Amino acid sequence: MKKAEIFRRVTVRLTLIHLGLFALASLIVFLLIYISLASALRSRTDTNLSNEVREFESLLNLKGMASLEKEFVNESRSNGIGSWFYLLLSPRLRIIVSSDLHPWKGVRFRPPLIHQLEEGEERITSSPHPGHSHKVRIVFKRVKGGRTLVVGHSLKANDEILKRTGEIFQYGFIAMLLMGGLLGWLVSRHAMSGVQRITDTARRIERGNLSWRVPIGKEGQEIEELAWAFNSMLDRIELLVTDLEEVTNNIAHDLRNPLTRIRGAAENLLSRAPHPAALQEMAGIIVESCDQLLNLINTMLTIAQADSGLSPPSSERIDLEDVVREMVDLFQPAAEDKGILLRIRHPDDIPAGWGDPLSLKRVIANLLDNAIKFSGAGNSITLTTGVEKSRVFLEVKDTGMGIDERDLPHIFDRFYRGDKSRSQPGNGLGLSLALALIRAQGGEITVTSAPGKGSTFRVYLPASS
Ligand code: ADP
């Protein structure tokens, strides 16, 4: 993998972000600790210096110079001559008494600011200690008689504490970086493993097997939701692909019969000397087969157009009684031929419907055609109109063979034909066309059926107000 590609990986980016955040957070924490430690050490030193100088001042006032000198020596011995020094300066800034100043060569005991001090006033400064890396903290206090008490303390111990803290931080910083990197890598790998599974599944599907699904893990809600969404998208695609395959097979099948018949007729014409009667028969077969093909293609196109909603049907007032009477007149002969009783039930107070009358007639014609097709002598078909809430309905009820429970959920699918209806003419598009046309007008079709007892189809349309 190229360098640029590595940095495009979310896992690497998240790890680096974690690393950066841990580094920044530990730097800020260290700086805060360091600054507050340094200031605490400084103020402790200053308090000690002030206390010391005040003690020496009262000793001087109470017991005099000799006791002070003795105390200077004792104190510097017990605290360490390299750590503390004490001295008393005359008004002309000459050393009157002092502790051993041997280790303090080069330290400025008489800075210019001393002259500005009032009696009782004290000032604390830091001063370099030549030859040493650390400084010296010194307090000057103007005491009685224009003299100045000076107490100094080396900052070596403080510097060492700060230095040690810095060293500890260096190790801590490295440990924090390692921890941050490791944690970032673990967290991002855990979160991304769900995404990786989805990618793996997508790749497997790419190789041709649409039945793969993403295993649902426990990486967290978002990843689980993504996996669910991906799986339900796959379910939908698989269903669509299966549907498409089925429709394609059905179309191929339905095209083959008429085409075979046309070809057979043409072959006959070629092989035999054309006799006028045979010619007419062949032409008849060809026209019939072509009609079958055209009918299939036109129905498919009408369904697709109605489903797409691209050219909405006309919307006008429909008098249901007119439709019912026209349809009964049209189908009465076919019903009579089969010995089926066709009747109408139209109450007076049914409002008009709202939709496309031509489409509605086509739908009712399909339903009546089926009702006659799947009923026999002695059965009856009743066309009823009615109103339900803000909708009107037109019902086609037959007492024919009924629909198997197994077939019922599929009868509106394209090309679906019940097992028992295979002997009847048809291509399984009648009901899908009816549903598409009615839905395009804002209506609905429902069906109830019991095998051996008959079927009831109801076509709902909005009522015209
Ligand atoms: P086709 O009538 O061309 O077979 P349809 O889409 O009109 O196709 O109907 C689909 C299937 O629904 C039919 O094959 C049949 O099994 C069933 N069907 C439809 N109407 C009825 C009915 N009135 N009685 C019994 N079965 C029916």
Image (cartoon, rainbow, N blue to C red):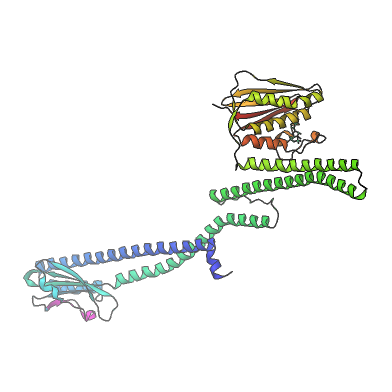
Q: Position of residue 433 (x, y in %)?
A: 69, 37
In this rendered view, identify the residue nearer to me: 254 or 187. 254
Q: Quadrant of residue 163?
A: bottom left
Q: How many marks?
A: 0
In this rendered view, identify the residue nearer to me: 16 or 348. 348
409 w.r.t. 223: above or below: above
Image quarter (top left, top right, bottom left or bottom right) of the C terminus: top right
Write the residue at 65% across / 31% down: 360
**Left/right of residue 29 with respect to residue 91 in the rendered view:** right
Q: Position of residue 120 (x, y in %)?
A: 11, 66
**Left/right of residue 54 with respect to residue 39 in the rendered view:** left
Write the residue at 15% across / 65% down: 54
> Of all residues shown, which one is farthest toward the left?
145
**Left/right of residue 157 with respect to residue 465 in the rendered view:** left
Q: Quadrant of residue 30?
A: bottom left
Give the magenta-colored segment's residue range: 95-108
Q: Position of residue 345 (x, y in %)?
A: 68, 20
In this rendered view, identify the residue nearer to me: 455 or 463. 463
> Of all residues shown, which one is farthest toward the front?
276
396 w.r.t. 103: above or below: above
Write the residue at 48% across / 64% down: 16
